[in-house]
Image (cartoon, rainbow, N blue to C red):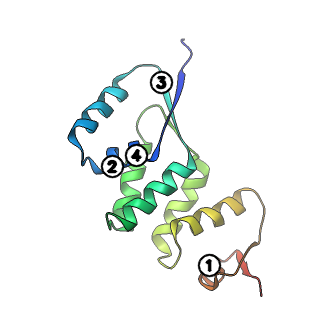
């Protein structure tokens, strides 16, 4: 079995895949996925930045954002922090007072057994269940 080549996506690739708003770039993305023996790595930061852009610039609902990102992450050969986002996506959908980044921080603290998550954010402390207000 041939060794897989590892490559990465940046935030713009995620956005183009989800939004399909620039036809020429979408065609080039299809070509990218047609290549054999490639494993694509997606950094946590690229996902969080894509969510921020989709919320703030495109005003997409949380449901559309999560659905789109989850579909992207199911592409064959896409590797990402499954354990983190398996926790983040439901929390993001269920807790409208928490930002996507807050959800990531709560999940990250839990995964690393580094709780409580100290904060000055009252909503985060109240809603998360594991964050504690400092002060």
Q: Position of residue 74 (x, y in %)?
A: 42, 41
Q: CA distance from mark 3 to mark 2?
A: 20 Å
Tag 1 or tag 2, which sits nearer the N-term?
A: 2
Q: Residue at x 31, y 26 (%)?
A: 31
Height in image: 3 above or below 116? above
Quickly name the residue at label 4. 12
Few, some or many C-alpha atoms within 10 Å of disc 3 (few <14, some 14-19, many ≥20)? some
Quickly name the residue at label 1. 124
Tag 4 or tag 3, which sits nearer the N-term?
A: 4
Q: CA distance from mark 2 to mark 4?
A: 10 Å
Q: Residue at x 54, y 12 (%)?
A: 2
Q: Secondary structure at mark 2?
A: helix
Q: Could you say which is closer to the camera, residue 87 or residue 131? A: 131
Q: CA distance from mark 3 to mark 1?
A: 39 Å
Residue 23's quadrant in the figure?
top left
Height in image: 51 above or below 31? below
Quickly name the residue at label 2. 18
Q: CA distance from mark 1 to mark 4?
A: 29 Å
Tag 4 or tag 2, which sits nearer the N-term?
A: 4
The quarter of the picture where the N terminus appears is: top right
Height in image: 51 above or below 39? below
Q: Secondary structure at mark 1?
A: helix
Tag 1 or tag 3, which sits nearer the N-term?
A: 3
Q: CA distance from mark 2 to mark 1?
A: 28 Å
Tag 2 or tag 3, which sits nearer the N-term?
A: 2
Few, some or many C-alpha atoms within 10 Å of disc 1 (few <14, some 14-19, many ≥20)? many
Quickly name the residue at label 3. 38
Q: Residue at x 50, y 79 (%)?
A: 97
Q: Secondary structure at mark 3?
A: strand
Whether tag 2 and tag 4 are in contact, CB under 8 A, the answer is no
């Amino acid at each position: 079995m041939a060794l897989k080549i590892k490559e990465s996506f940046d935030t713009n690739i995620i956005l183009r895949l989800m939004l399909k708003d620039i036809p020429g770039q979408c065609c080039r993305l299809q070509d990218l996925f047609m290549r054999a023996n490639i494993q694509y790595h997606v950094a946590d930061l690229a996902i969080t930045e894509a969510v921020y852009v989709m919320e703030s610039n495109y005003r997409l609902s949380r449901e559309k954002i999560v659905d789109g990102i989850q579909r992207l992450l199911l592409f064959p050969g896409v590797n990402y922090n499954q354990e983190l986002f398996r926790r983040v996506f439901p929390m993001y959908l269920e807790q409208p007072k928490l930002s996507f980044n807050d959800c990531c921080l709560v999940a990250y603290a839990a995964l690393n057994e580094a709780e409580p998550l100290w904060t000055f954010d009252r909503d985060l402390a109240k809603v998360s269940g594991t964050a504690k207000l400092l002060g």
